[in-house]
Amino acid sequence: MCKKNDAFGFSMGIIAGVVGGILAGVLFAPKSGEESRKEIKEAVCEFYDKHAPQIEDAKKQAIESVDLVRYKLERQFRKLNNSMKSKKMQKAKELEDINSDNEFDY
């Protein structure tokens, strides 16, 4: 059984392979630059028209993955930041306690 991420990776691999194959075929064909550009444009438009739902799904999954990673990174950053603040506060309290103890040592 395929997991969601496995299916996403597989579909992205298929899309990349198809696009790469089309581009390689067009670029290595003995035609003028203008003809090649026209064929590339037509091939990309045809590919998009044929696979628009899959492309939109892949785009949506990629955005969701990026958002999840960003959320996790922000959460870890907040934890680290709070930990650093806590350590600074603890150190300041220790210094304050040491100074208050020294005030009464005449």
Image (cartoon, rainbow, N blue to C red):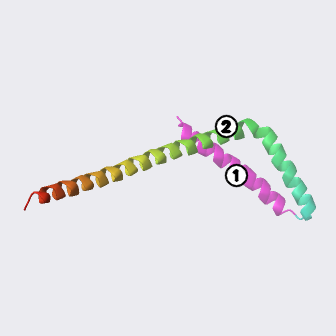
Q: Position of residue 33 (x, y in %)?
A: 90, 64
Q: Is residue 26 left or right of residue 101?
A: right
Q: Disc 1 to disc 2, how far (Cα)? A: 17 Å
**What type is the residue that disc 2 sits on?**
Asp
Magenta segment main secondary structure: helix
Q: Position of residue 38 (x, y in %)?
A: 90, 55
Choose top left, top right, bottom left or bottom right for residue 23: bottom right
Would residue 11 be counted in the magenta stretch? yes
Foreground: disc 1 or disc 2: 2
Q: Which residue is identified by label 2?
A: 57
Quickly name the residue at label 1.
17
Report helix, strand or loop for mark 1: helix
Chain part drawn in magenta: 1-29
Q: Residue at x 35, y 53 (%)?
A: 84
The percent coordinates of residue 62 (x first, y second) are: 61, 43
24 lies above or below 58: below
The answer to if 47 sits in the magenta stretch is no
Task: Tell me residue 43's x, y (percent).
Answer: 84, 49
